[in-house]
Image (cartoon, helix red, strand yellow):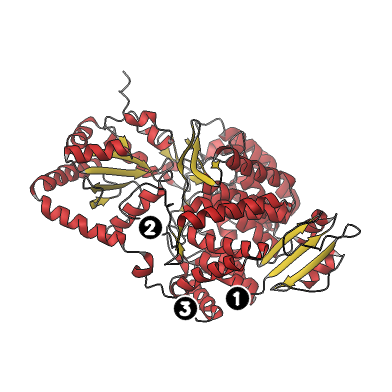
Amino acid sequence: MKATANRLIHETSPYLLQHAYNPVDWYPWGRAALEKAQSEDKPILLSIGYSACHWCHVMERESFEHKSIAEVMNKHFVCIKLDREERPDIDQIYMEAIQAMGLSGGWPLNVFLTPDQKPFYGGTYFPPDRWNKLLISVANAYQTNRLALEDSAEKFHKALKIGVVTKYQLHDQDGKAANILDQAIEKLKAAFDEVNGGMQKAPKFPMPVIWNFVIHYYAGKRDQQLLQHLYLTLDKMCQGGLYDQIGGGFARYSVDSRWFAPHFEKMLYDNAQLVSLYAKAYSISQNQRYRTVVYQTIDFLSRELLHPQGGFYSALDADSEGEEGKFYIWQYHDFSEVVGKSGDFLIDFYGLTPEGNWENGQNILYQQQDLESFARQHNMDTDWLSNILEEYHEKLLNARNERIRPGLDHKIICGWNGLMIKALTDAYAVFSEDRFLQLALKCAAFIEDHMTSGDQLYRTHVVKGSKTPAFLEDYAATIDGYLGLYQVTFHEKWLYRAQNLMSFAIENFYDVEDHLFFYTGSYSDDLIARKKELFDNVIPSSNSTMTHNLWLLGVMLDRQSYLDLSQKMLDRVQKLISSDPVYLSNWAAALSFFEFTTAEIVIGGKAAEEYRRQIAPFFHPHKVMLGATEDSTLPLLKDRVDYSQTRVYICYNQACQLPTTDPKKAISQLSY
């Protein structure tokens, strides 16, 4: 007999719906739950996770589906389930609270709150026995030691309300940016893993935000050591089990230092940023391996995460059939049967063994050496090997597709789709592959049609419609995506859409005293703290992205107020950039635009699009491209469209060299 549904059955988040038949009397976050806690004077148990989270599923199976544990939860607490991807604003507050308690953060995140939402204890994953004991202990403490508990909650609340400017002593700096960037790079270098690439620790996250800064710094300083470590990192990541060797796309992180054993969930935000990163690396190196990664990853995203109308879904679970990675791993004999005798060389290429190279006799596919070295060792032609791999990948992919698939989180998240638009425009700029541009345009149209009301964005879209006003992350990434679209199409509507979204964000998110943006809009829910997102992580912080957006808009629209605002934001964090660059890498990349030579490439005339195609792939991370085939009112284009011939102007700080009608000559004028 099927269990009775709880209140989550009316939600749209796939993560919340996964818990809709738990015996726990779950509430979604909202007035009903908060008022119940107040009226019944019960503590709140806030449990936060997301659909692709392996340990979230484990805790659900072990505890939330357990009737006797659910009875304890229902008796003593008002239980709220929250999807952190749907409400990152709430997740931020209580993750910071857990860390203020001296506890490790992560998901699932389980936090105990007073009826007025103030946190007093919490943690992450708990085995069922410990969880049951903790529930009883907290319930008893709430009844017998209430004053001390509320005093503790008030202290944590006060800590949460301290702003980032005060907390991190962010004072305007007048130091030279070059010194700050040099210091940041030296700190990063000290933490490099010189053998396996990336940083010196496990688990290892791809952290594209770090390597994007490395590219910007390399362009300014020509640091060959830095470039070689970038290549080492990109090579090792795409050769490891972190990368899906058959289907393309990257897992969220590797549990070891060699990029071998992944945590198998696949996130849109990782893959979007890694498409951008590998495309940029190709533009420097012309390494065909990086081109292959870009194409395979976009193929994966198009095949497995694409909504029919153009938006991209958020994630694939790590688990299938209750087992992590089951969809992706191989038994030796199953793999051999698919590839046949003629494909035996793939067993060596991907490191399979009869006893298994991973757990329980299973194999993770990884490249023991790069394609070129393997071809030489086995007396194969490199091009032949590359082509034959595609044939075998198709066979293996077809065989794998017969398996039960991992769960799909079909939320469409605005900010992550903004990252995807930017990724596709970066890839299109380098490779001129028209389907990349069409995917980007359809994704942007999806946001405009389904996740936008005037100049206001919505955070998520699911089958039943869009829900939750967007956060700064969504505005920042969408603006960045639209600016990327303008630069590869020269369609000014995307530039002006970006400007309108920026105006809305300044009006509703900007703090004029701190020179930083709040994460939540002025119209948002009344939470116990209004936070500012400062630190870059697996996704660049919304403030660092807005800094870059303001700079780009300032240049493109000749708006000094935007440039000044961008500079003020950077002035606040310069000290932190040099002291903690791992978590301020995107800030450092933004600062590099002010420090290093920036090229303004202006193309006017009927052949503007063709000239753009020739110039765009040239590596120059500090370039801005503007163009028009007809008269434009943009300051850098005004009076520069000549219908008789197309001209290119290479400008630095709004001072232009003599125009040329030859794209190759224009490229020769670019310096960095």
Classify mark 2: residues with Cα within 10 Å, few (<14), some (14-19) or many (20+).
Answer: many
Classify mark 1: residues with Cα within 10 Å, few (<14), some (14-19) or many (20+).
Answer: some
Reading the image, the residue beneath label 3 is 173
Q: Nearer the viewer, mark 1 or mark 2?
A: 2
- Is residue 609 at all visible to an observer of this figure? yes
Disc with the residue nearer the chain's start (3 vs 1): 3
Reading the image, the residue beneath label 1 is 595
Q: Secondary structure at mark 1?
A: helix
Q: Amino acid at mark 1?
A: Glu
Q: On the image, which quarter does residue 276 sit in?
A: bottom right
Q: Nearer the viewer, mark 3 or mark 1?
A: 3
Reading the image, the residue beneath label 2 is 531
The location of residue 456, given as percent across then percent down, is 52, 46
The location of residue 571, given as percent across then percent down, is 49, 73
Q: What's the distance in space between the residues labelled 1 and 2, CA to CA?
A: 29 Å
Residue at x 56% of width, y 52% of height = 501
Q: What's the distance in space between the residues labelled 3 and 2, CA to CA?
A: 23 Å
The location of residue 270, given as percent across then percent down, is 53, 51
Disc with the residue nearer the chain's start (3 vs 2): 3
Q: Quadrant of the C terminus?
A: bottom right
- Is residue 268 at all visible to an observer of this figure? no
